Amino acid sequence: MKKRMKKLMALMMVGAMALSFAACGDAAETGSDSDAGSDAGSDSDAGSDKDTGSGDAGSGSDAGAENILDGKTVGFAQTDSMSSWRTTETDDIKEFVENAGGSFIVKDAGGDIATQESDIRDLVAAGVDFLVVAPLEDNGLQGALSEAMENEIPVILVDRAIAGEVGTHYTTAIMSDFVWEGEQCANALMEALPDGGNVVIINGGYDSSTSTDRQQGFVDALDADKYPIVGEQDGEWLMDKAQSVMENIIQAQGGENIDAVFCVTDDMVQGAMNAIEAADLKPGEDILTLGIDGTRAAFEAIESGKQLASCTCTPYFGNIVVETISKIINGEEIPEHITNEDTLYTKDNVDVEVGF
């Protein structure tokens, strides 16, 4: 880390000589929208040094006003562009980087870990000055990330964890507390069903700490005797897949034997609600629904009574990413783990305009 700091400070002093590969900013790539959920994750390897960051959107940050990234290129290795959460995340980081005077390259892995590994190596070869990565999975990127760090390119992980080490695989990690998000949904369910009930879980798979952490937080907070898990399947982050697996669970269990369904993303809640309605049941009445992300669609469903609760998981990383890069450039010490704060929304406090 000290070696990287010395190099960055030296680059600042020589000014124009520090402009490395700025033209790479013209090579931006984007993907197409479809239905999927967000994937963040908590990082148990990030160490105990924590800070709380703000992921609020909007232009005109102090870092941007100073053009702190003038002549710098930020590369972003995105998992996919298959949800509004993902596209919002990409757009927000791009906006803040460019407002700070920097060039921005985004590589879209399309949901494939091998592609994302290759994307990271491409960005390293292009000579980006800073690398932002939203890891698709816990494992599979360590070699490429180590290559970036060995080339003295600071790596900022956003919204998901990896099984790696600070200083070797990344510089800092910025993400939400996903166990906490799951706990908040469990608390909302227990308040709505104080006498207990049968619960279904639709997760996003077991290769992402996002899904496992959210499910762990939810399950651990519940009284297992009062809230038995009667069905659990992988919705693969997709609305359509969540609808299919919920249809299967309803057929197997009987809709009358299910009291609530918790999905680790709001997009999958939408799919589960479609399945509930297809079974001539009413979401929010016959079966309660809960999710995470804080999408506009979820907030509208909460307002109408179809969804019980949604815990936000902000996709707005632009401000805190540029602030973190600014600190690196200025030689300031940065924490190993920065936590974005989130909020549980129910009918009592929901604001549709807050959704994305």
Image: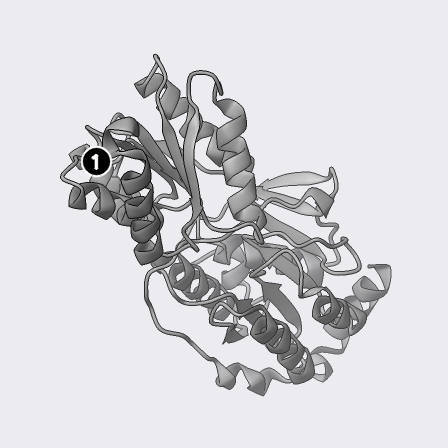
Residue extending furthest toward the front: 252
* Side of 78 where 152 appears, left or right: right
What kind of element bears circle 1? loop
Residue 200 horizontal/vertical position (percent): 38, 35
Q: Dot 1 corresponds to which residue?
A: 283
**Residue at 26% over, 35% down:** 307
Residue type at mark 1 is Pro
The residue located at (41%, 36%) in the rendering is 231
Q: Is residue 273 toward the left or the right of residue 167 in the image?
A: left
Picture quadrant of residue 51: top right
Q: Where does the image place residue 193, in percent across and percent down from the top left?
A: 32, 18
Q: Quadrant of residue 328?
A: bottom right
Q: From this viewpoint, which residue is outermost toward the left?
A: 280
| Badge 1: residue crowd in 10 Å (few <14, some 14–19, many ≥20) | many
Q: Vertically, is 68 above or below 333? A: below
Residue at 49%, 53% in the rendered image: 39
Residue at the (73%, 46%) spot, across then down? 45
